[in-house]
């Protein structure tokens, strides 16, 4: 793999950029791999990457029915934070956030991690107590957050209206090293690095069946032929139930549409991510200048990547109340993604009833920020059979009543 | 002891439509088997009216009956006659499985009239309010902006809207905003 | 934005009048039931790409719950019927079969 | 230079003028002008700078597809960035400024980017700016953000108003061109209720510019006649300045009406968002002309051929004296012919087709215009204006054959149907090889609730080419839409339009077809985002092969025009680079809205006081008048406390508690949920709903109850009152009323539908007042003749009395631990009762107390609070509430869940009181640490604070918390780290801090 650098760009400029090699290869499938990962989104590619990097397992194929990074990796609002309440969540999201810090350098691909800070606004006394509790928990979890005053919120986000007639800002939970990254680049960077390790990324390769023998996985059937494997990781947000069905088990998840929108671009006016959970909206500004706005999920099962408009309406009116200057902006584009929501709205990183099959799903609305940490932990789980980052996220927790519920700290939005 | 007061205390607004606090109104929720002869008789006895058809209202002299759901009616009468009407219902329905409860103070009633009444409501409610679709005698329970509401249309073209008491200010504010001059849509002339 | 027809009051209204309440035709398992049965009742969702039986309440309307059969991929509505029904009516099953031959749902198909 | 012609301008009212400014320069236009046409009439060719290289940008198009002419409009709180000049009608006093430059439009420092463009190809930022690490956030990113971003930041305080409107029709027709008019007419004549929407101020679309006859009359006359016919039909609604913004599931359509953008100051809403339910939607949205990709195609003065024609005919504006036309189809000849007829010079028509054009080409030649076939543009000369073009053979690599001086270039790469609205909700497209465009696939329309298609494309939006075909197609579409909504079409035939005999288009995706790198890196695809042919080719070489990859890697089509001009050209280049046919490459997804719509229109009227409902109790007005400090509790507002004078919150709360504990206080408890449950099975039903036994409650008595969800977690609590044998009144928490009532109906309707129970939510029928404190009885007896003694009305009993002349229910329940009565009266008399209590209590120094005093007092008493002690993960057993869980019952909601291993785990954290050793207040939410760290390196914990207050009664901090094995560890001291790095030590104690034996409440 030729390294990317300013020198490489300069060199290529002088020969009309004809010398760049492919970011990732486009090979034909082998008969068998040690590990097959289904789903070349951020989580699948990161899993493959850390299987290679941390465990030396490189005879790996990542199968993708469409184009890599084409699922939720490429349609989220790119927020990165780890200020979660419950220990297992804080552990995996903080691992993830810390990996994001150096990911550009690790992958030699600029994923534009921008630790511009994330504020979760407290707009009721109940939220104040919830976020103070989170700050307390974070201090013990090694996650750096603080509960800040309204004046400090205003200092960081000058365009905010502290005294909304309905919900005044009473403070905020601030994570200074949270932020955003360029979502596509995360998938592309991992894909390039996986390919460089000799792994196969097989796009337009749709899994249509999963073969088992004696309760153990043996391979998959695809539109590009049968492919054998010793271990299979299912990492297909939005389609997890469908794949589990092929493997003969059912998951505690439901798939719903999550909506987002962007405004037209404007000059920089907000150097922070702000989440307002009381009024259901969150906003940041992309490097292009668009205000990136996230809303809620629809209440019904849906695989269409479209959502109902009234959720957009609810989000937008909340943002106008919170950031009055956006009133004169225009919506450029709205879209939806399909997210898997579990019984406790926390993810599943788990062994399954079928030997050799592992499942990584249920990230709900919080998947993007978890990509490196999820890949790191899931690779360990697949390689070693357990991982401290994943052990609490097993499927068995629903049988035991051992939930990891983040909604308790006032905010359910991820 | 001072008199009972409505939350809007007689407020009114004149714009594309006239929005007015309709004042105290007696309201009784009656739940039961609407097809039974006992309920039919009880309603007749209490307010002198029959059982309306699905999503319809029947009105009489100072009373009305609104169909609210397959097992629920809303009976309207004078505010201070509620106790007497409920007693009548309870007597007539003795031994039956039913519920008759005073909800007069849980709700407030607004009167929306004038040529812009349909458009005013159509700005706030996801309901076809064209004259061909919404005709006198109809009742609609729906959403008005961000609150649940019910309205019906009387024979003189006046809409009566019922919402919860606690959001009376909001309802009035939203209706007033929708009826501001200059906001004529011009489709239900 | 979905459009729904409430079988209880006959209103055809937009989604904002209604509230979705999850999978329909669930069999409740109470004290004494097995872990598997309880887990199946509470958590193991059908979540199909296809016909989905779901509960809705006409909360900004007549207040009644009902069941809707809806396709999660095409959003086609195969029909609505009152909540006091143990299994989907035949006409609705037939409508689903016409579009989704071989469909299944827990104990019936 | 561009200028106003002496003739032409069919949309103008030349008798009047309107003054406006651009970058402070005064200019003049006519009513009917768009800002674009008025700028061009004033020779303002340069209107902005591009996103990445800050290249000079001029107007390219005449409609919604314009990528360049974006301006900042208005001033102060009405300033709006990124307004499209081509769709902005001018008015007197309009002020516009150009965007994305510094210090000025003419001399932009950012234009330096253009000089180093070679070093900034697609995706360059993914390959650099990685070292040193902190530089991305602090150096590179700020620079990139500042140079990007287009428009200026608007200001807060938008004074305009916005609204929504719900509309229902059988057929909604989007687009008021000839196709839309005819489709609407055909549907209306069948009896369908029709809505016809047109995004501009004018009806008829392009047809009047292109000319032709319908049924023997000029098309402009046919338009007027048809419009008049439609206006006379009562079941037809016509709406101009109203854009079809988005098509959503189940036939939901958004219309974006710009009611008064063109007439600010007029007292009307600025925008109105139409929320339309249509049985069928006809998209008569026309087609958009594509640019051609040749070097220098972005220089101001290079424009779409149709736009140049529009400006001449509609607005009487010429772009230049000498216009070179370059095309791959016949339509652009119309521009040459039109301009020639205006007396302007056409030095040449460069037709890339070897075989040249049809009848129109002959007409052009007949007018003496030089027509070169098989030729194209090698490059355009000029910087901020066109100076000339270098001609080459289309088949070659760009060797210059000749240079022609000119000041405008009219280009046409063919037409793409506007398929956006067709596609928003899943309508598929097919590639039409002959016409070289994607058009709607009638076999795969978006499907509605009934599984049938609900969108029909009509006219040129459906790929129809000339007037004849367009009208026939639109007529059929209107009839089909009517039929689909149950209206039999009338028998009439489609009007007959004329149809020119046009020669077929030849796809030209790159000009010349073998252009070398130096030309390709100057051949723009996306003008706003600066994406060139060479960028797409680079993306393909690097493996970004999917159309979505190429788009995202290069940012093609991601600008404010969403690729209306660039997408097809870009994917053709990509297909070529990949050696695959265009349909195999496919398109990117079309997402709403069609063009950007204001966020304010989306929010509608919901701003300020009606942003969200505020729920008010009957006593709200009194609270307001008496200085209450409110807090939001759900949608309610409840007084947090009632500060007096200069008092702060803490002092006020302390005073309220002291007074209540020492004498008497009043709490407005009206927000508590109140639900009537009645019927022969009511007791049985409540036994399932609550963990405790309710069926054994005697009439006249109250009982505290807990409700869990089916997952076992505690979700609500409250006092249940038995009114009579068959009737219960269930109190819920403030936030729980609607949810619990909903839940009751859920179980009754969906699970136990044969049980005879009716419920009614009567929360708001009652004003409820808690009168608490040792003097509570004395106060009440002043207002009531009824016997309120402990004998007549014991603790946990209730009765009906007359208080202050009002019949009231009175409950002997206490949340403060004091002697307490809760009075419920009809809401309409609530304020009167409150005022009577305040007056009668004067001698006792009665005070209202707020939610915070209530919280502190209940904590002193060790009562749990839903939302504090519970958070959705806590079960009643955790809170020592086993006494409220019936052991006799076989079942209640949540019982099975509580049998699961983790729920029954003896190691669960349980409720205790916590007392700091030094009397300090423990921080909210603090955790008690345990030795060591877990496998993820996190500190181990063994408990946490759930409620923590300063108790004025005890003069120290008190807290409740959940601690592992807590009730077995009384007296043990735990360590709670604080956020400032300190540690607070607290002893585990009984959670009841005040009046353990209940002597005060039970008197």
Image (cartoon, rainbow, N blue to C red):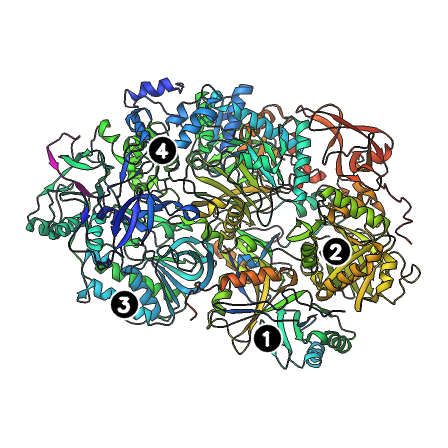
Which chain does tag 3 point to?
Answer: D
D9 lies above or below D991: below
Which chain does tag 1 point to?
Answer: B
Q: Secondary structure at mark 1?
A: strand
- What range of the chain is rendered magenta? D392-415
D103 lies above or below C70: above
Q: Residue under circle 3?
A: D226
C77 and A164: which is toward the camera = A164
Q: Residue under circle 4?
A: D554
Residues tagged by mark 2 and mark 3 found on one chain of the structure: yes
- Residue C64 in the image: x percent, y percent? 63, 62
Cα separation, mark 2 vs mark 3, equals 64 Å
Residues tagged by mark 2 and mark 1 found on one chain of the structure: no
Which chain does tag 2 point to?
Answer: D
Q: Residue under circle 1?
A: B57
Which chain does tag 4 point to?
Answer: D
Q: Which image quadrant for residue D320? A: top left
Q: Are marks 1 and 3 in contact (CB under 8 Å)?
A: no
Cα separation, mark 1 vs mark 3, equals 42 Å
Cα separation, mark 3 vs mark 4, equals 46 Å
Q: Residue under circle 2?
A: D669
Q: Are marks 2 and 4 in contact (CB under 8 Å)?
A: no
Which residue corresponds to the image point at 55% horizontal and 76% vertical from the top-left?
B154
* B138 on left or right of D686: left
D162 and D243: which is toward the camera = D162
| Marked residue nearer the N-terminal end (2 or 4) | 4
| Marked residue nearer the N-terminal end (2 or 3) | 3
């Amino acid at each position: 793999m030729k390294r990317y650098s300013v020198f490489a760009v300069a060199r290529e400029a002088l020969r009309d950029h004809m010398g760049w090699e492919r970011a990732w290869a486009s090979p034909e499938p082998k008969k068998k791999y040690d590990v097959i990962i289904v789903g070349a989104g951020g989580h699948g590619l990161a899993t493959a990457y850390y299987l290679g990097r941390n465990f030396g397992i490189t005879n790996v194929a990542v199968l993708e029915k469409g184009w890599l990074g084409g699922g939720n990796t490429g349609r989220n609002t790119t927020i990165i934070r780890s200020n979660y309440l419950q220990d297992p969540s804080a552990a995996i999201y903080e691992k993830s956030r810390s990996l994001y810090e150096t990911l550009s350098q690790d992958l030699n691909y600029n994923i534009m991690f921008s630790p511009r800070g994330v504020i979760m606004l407290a707009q009721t006394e109940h939220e104040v107590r919830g976020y103070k509790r989170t700050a307390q928990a974070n201090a013990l979890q090694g996650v750096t957050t603080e509960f800040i005053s309204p004046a400090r919120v205003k200092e960081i986000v000058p365009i905010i209206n502290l005294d909304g007639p309905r919900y005044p800002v009473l403070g905020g939970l601030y994570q200074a090293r949270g932020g955003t990254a360029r979502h596509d680049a995360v998938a592309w960077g991992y894909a390039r690095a996986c390919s460089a390790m000799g792994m196969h990324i097989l796009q337009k390769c749709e899994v249509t069946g999963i073969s088992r023998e004696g309760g153990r996985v043996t391979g998959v059937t695809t539109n590009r032929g049968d492919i054998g494997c010793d271990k299979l990781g299912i990492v297909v947000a939005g389609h997890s139930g469908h794949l589990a069905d092929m493997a003969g088990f059912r998951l505690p998840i439901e798939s719903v549409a999550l909506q987002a929108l962007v405004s037209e671009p404007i000059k920089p006016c907000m150097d922070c991510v702000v989440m307002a959970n009381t009024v259901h909206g969150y906003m940041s500004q992309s490097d292009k200048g668009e205000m990136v706005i996230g809303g809620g999920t629809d209440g019904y099962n849906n695989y269409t990547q479209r959502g109902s408009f009234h959720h957009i309406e609810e989000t937008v009116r909340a943002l106008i109340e919170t950031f009055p200057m956006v009133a004169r902006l225009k919506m450029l584009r709205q879209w939806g993604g399909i997210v898997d929501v579990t019984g406790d709205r926390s993810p599943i990183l788990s062994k399954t009833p079928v030997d050799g099959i592992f499942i990584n799903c249920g990230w709900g609305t919080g998947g993007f920020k978890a990509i490196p940490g999820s890949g790191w932990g899931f690779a360990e789980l697949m390689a070693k059979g357990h991982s401290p980052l994943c052990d609490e996220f097993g499927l068995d927790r629903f049988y035991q009543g051992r939930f990891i519920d983040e909604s308790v700290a006032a905010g359910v939005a991820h | 002891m001072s008199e009972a007061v409505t939350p809007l205390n007689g407020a009114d607004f004149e714009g594309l439509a006239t929005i007015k606090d309709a004042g105290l109104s007696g309201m009784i929720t009656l739940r039961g088997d609407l097809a039974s002869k006992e309920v039919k008789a009880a309603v007749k006895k209490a307010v002198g009216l029959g059982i309306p058809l699905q999503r319809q209202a029947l009105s009489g002299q100072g009373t009305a009956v609104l169909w609210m759901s397959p097992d629920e009616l809303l009976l309207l009468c004078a505010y201070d006659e509620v106790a007497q009407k409920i007693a009548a219902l309870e007597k007539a329905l003795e031994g039956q499985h039913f519920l008759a409860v005073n909800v007069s103070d849980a709700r407030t009633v607004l009167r929306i009239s004038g040529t812009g009444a349909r458009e005013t409501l159509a700005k706030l409610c996801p309901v076809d309010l064209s004259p061909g679709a919404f005709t006198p005698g109809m009742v609609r329970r729906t959403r008005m902006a961000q609150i649940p509401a019910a309205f019906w249309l009387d024979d003189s073209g006046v809409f009566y809207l019922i919402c919860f008491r606690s959001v009376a200010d909001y309802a009035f504010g939203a209706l007033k905003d929708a009826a501001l001059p200059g906001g004529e849509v011009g489709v239900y002339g | 934005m979905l459009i729904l027809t409430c079988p209880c009051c006959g209103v055809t209204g937009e989604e904002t009048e209604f509230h979705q309440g999850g999978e329909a035709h669930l069999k409740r398992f109470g004290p004494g039931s097995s872990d598997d049965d309880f887990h199946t009742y509470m958590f193991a969702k059908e979540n199909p790409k296809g016909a989905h039986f779901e509960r809705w309440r006409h909360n900004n309307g007549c207040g009644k719950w009902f069941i809707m059969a809806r396709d999660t991929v095409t959003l086609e509505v195969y029909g609505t019927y009152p909540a006091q029904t143990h299994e989907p009516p035949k006409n609705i099953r037939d409508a689903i079969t016409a579009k989704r031959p071989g469909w299944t749902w827990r104990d019936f198909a | 230079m561009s200028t106003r012609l002496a003739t032409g301008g069919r949309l103008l009212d030349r008798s009047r003028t309107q003054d406006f400014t651009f970058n402070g320069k005064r200019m003049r236009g006519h009513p009917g002008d768009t800002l674009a046409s008025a700028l061009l009439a004033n020779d303002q060719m340069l209107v902005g700078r591009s996103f990445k290289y800050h290249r000079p940008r001029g107007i390219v198009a005449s409609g919604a597809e314009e990528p360049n002419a974006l301006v900042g409009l208005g001033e102060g709180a009405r300033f709006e960035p990124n307004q499209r000049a081509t769709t902005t009608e001018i008015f007197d006093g309009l002020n516009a400024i150009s965007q994305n430059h510094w210090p000025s439009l003419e001399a932009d420092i950012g234009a330096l980017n253009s000089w180093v463009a070679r070093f900034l190809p697609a995706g360059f930022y993914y390959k650099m700016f990685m070292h040193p690490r902190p530089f991305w956030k602090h150096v590179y990113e700020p620079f990139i953000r500042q140079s990007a971003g287009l428009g200026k930041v608007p200001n807060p305080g938008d004074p305009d108003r916005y609204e929504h409107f719900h509309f229902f029709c059988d057929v909604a027709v989007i687009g008021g061109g000839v196709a839309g008019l005819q489709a609407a007419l055909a549907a209306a004549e069948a009896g369908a209720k029709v809505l016809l929407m047109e995004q501009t101020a004018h009806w008829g679309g392009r047809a009047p510019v292109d000319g032709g006859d319908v049924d023997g009359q000029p098309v402009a006359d046919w338009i007027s006649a048809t419009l008049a016919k439609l206006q006379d039909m009562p079941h037809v609604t016509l709406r101009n300045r109203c854009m079809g913004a988005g098509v959503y599931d189940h036939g939901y359509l958004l219309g974006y009406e710009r009611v008064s953008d063109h007439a600010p100051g007029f007292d009307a809403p600025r925008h109105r968002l139409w929320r339309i339910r249509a049985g069928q939607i006809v998209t008569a949205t026309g087609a958009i002309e594509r640019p051609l990709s040749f070097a220098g195609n972005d220089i101001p003065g290079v424009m779409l051929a149709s736009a140049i024609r529009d400006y001449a005919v509609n607005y009487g504006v010429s772009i230049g004296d000498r216009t070179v036309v370059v095309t791959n189809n016949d339509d652009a000849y119309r521009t040459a012919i039109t301009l020639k007829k205006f007396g302007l010079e056409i030095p040449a028509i460069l037709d890339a087709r070897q075989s040249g054009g049809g009848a129109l080409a002959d007409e052009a030649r007949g007018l003496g215009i030089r027509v070169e076939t098989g030729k194209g543009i090698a490059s355009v000369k000029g910087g901020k204006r066109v100076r000339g073009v270098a001609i080459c053979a289309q088949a070659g690599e760009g060797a210059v054959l000749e240079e022609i001086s000119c000041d405008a270039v009219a280009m046409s790469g063919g037409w793409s149907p506007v398929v956006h609205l067709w596609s928003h909700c899943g309508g598929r497209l097919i590639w039409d090889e002959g016409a070289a465009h994607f058009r709607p696939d009638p076999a795969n329309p978006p499907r509605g609730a009934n599984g049938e298609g609900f969108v029909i494309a009509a006219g040129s939006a459906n790929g129809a080419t000339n007037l004849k075909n367009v009208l026939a197609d639109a007529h059929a579409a209107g009839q089909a839409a009517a039929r689909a909504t149950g209206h039999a079409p009338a028998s009439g035939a489609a009007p007959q339009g004329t149809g020119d005999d046009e020669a077929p288009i030849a796809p030209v995706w790159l000009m010349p077809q073998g252009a070398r790198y130096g030309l390709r890196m100057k051949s723009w695809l996306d003008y706003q985002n600066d994406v060139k042919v060479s960028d797409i080719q680079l993306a393909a070489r690097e493996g970004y092969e999917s159309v979505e990859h190429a788009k995202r890697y290069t940012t093609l089509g991601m600008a404010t025009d969403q690729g209306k001009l660039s997408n097809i050209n870009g994917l053709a280049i990509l297909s070529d680079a990949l050696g695959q046919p265009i349909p195999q490459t496919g398109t990117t997804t079309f997402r709403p809205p069609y063009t950007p719509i204001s966020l304010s229109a989306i929010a509608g009227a919901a701003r300020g006081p009606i942003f969200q409902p505020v729920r008010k109790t009957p006593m709200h007005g009194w609270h307001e008048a008496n200085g209450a400090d409110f807090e939001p509790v759900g949608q309610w507002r409840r007084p947090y406390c009632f500060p007096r004078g200069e008092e702060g919150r803490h002092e006020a709360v302390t005073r309220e508690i002291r007074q209540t504990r020492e004498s008497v206080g009043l709490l407005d408890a009206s927000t508590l949920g109140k639900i009537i449950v009645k019927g022969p099975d009511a007791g049985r039903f409540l036994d399932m709903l609550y963990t405790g036994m309710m069926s054994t409650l005697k009439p006249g008595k109250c009982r505290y109850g807990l409700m869990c969800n089916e997952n076992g977690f505690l979700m609500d609590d409250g006092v249940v009152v038995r009114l009579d044998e068959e009737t219960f009144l269930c109190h819920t928490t403030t936030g729980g009323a609607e949810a619990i009532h909903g839940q009751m109906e859920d179980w009754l309707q969906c699970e136990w539908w044969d049980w005879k129970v009716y419920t009614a939510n009567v929360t708001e029928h009652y004003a409820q007042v808690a009168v608490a404190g040792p003097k509570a009885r004395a106060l009440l007896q002043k207002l009531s003749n009824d016997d309120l003694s402990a004998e007549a009305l014991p603790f946990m009993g209730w009765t009906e009395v007359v208080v202050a002349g009002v019949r009231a229910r009175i409950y002997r329940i206490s949340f403060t631990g004091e002697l307490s009565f809760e009075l419920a009266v009809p809401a309409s008399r609530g304020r009167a009762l409150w005022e009577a209590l305040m007056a009668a209590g004067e001698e006792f120094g009665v005070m209202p107390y707020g939610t915070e005093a209530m919280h502190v007092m209940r904590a002193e008493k060790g009562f749990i609070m839903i939302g504090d002690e519970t958070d959705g993960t806590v079960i009643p057993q955790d809170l020592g509430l086993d006494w409220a869980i019936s052991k006799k019952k076989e079942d209640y909601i949540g019982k099975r869940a509580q049998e699961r291993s983790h729920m029954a785990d003896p190691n669960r954290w349980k409720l205790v009181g916590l007392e700091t050793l030094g009397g300090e207040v423990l921080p909210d939410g603090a955790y008690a640490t345990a030795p060591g760290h877990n496998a993820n390196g996190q500190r181990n914990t063994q408990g946490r604070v759930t409620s923590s207050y300063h108790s004025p009664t005890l003069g120290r901090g008190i807290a409740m918390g959940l601690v592992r094995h807590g009730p077995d560890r009384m007296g043990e001291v735990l360590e709670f780290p604080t956020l400032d790095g300190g540690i607070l030590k607290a002893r585990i104690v009984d959670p009841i801090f005040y009046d353990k034996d209940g002597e005060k409440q039970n008197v």
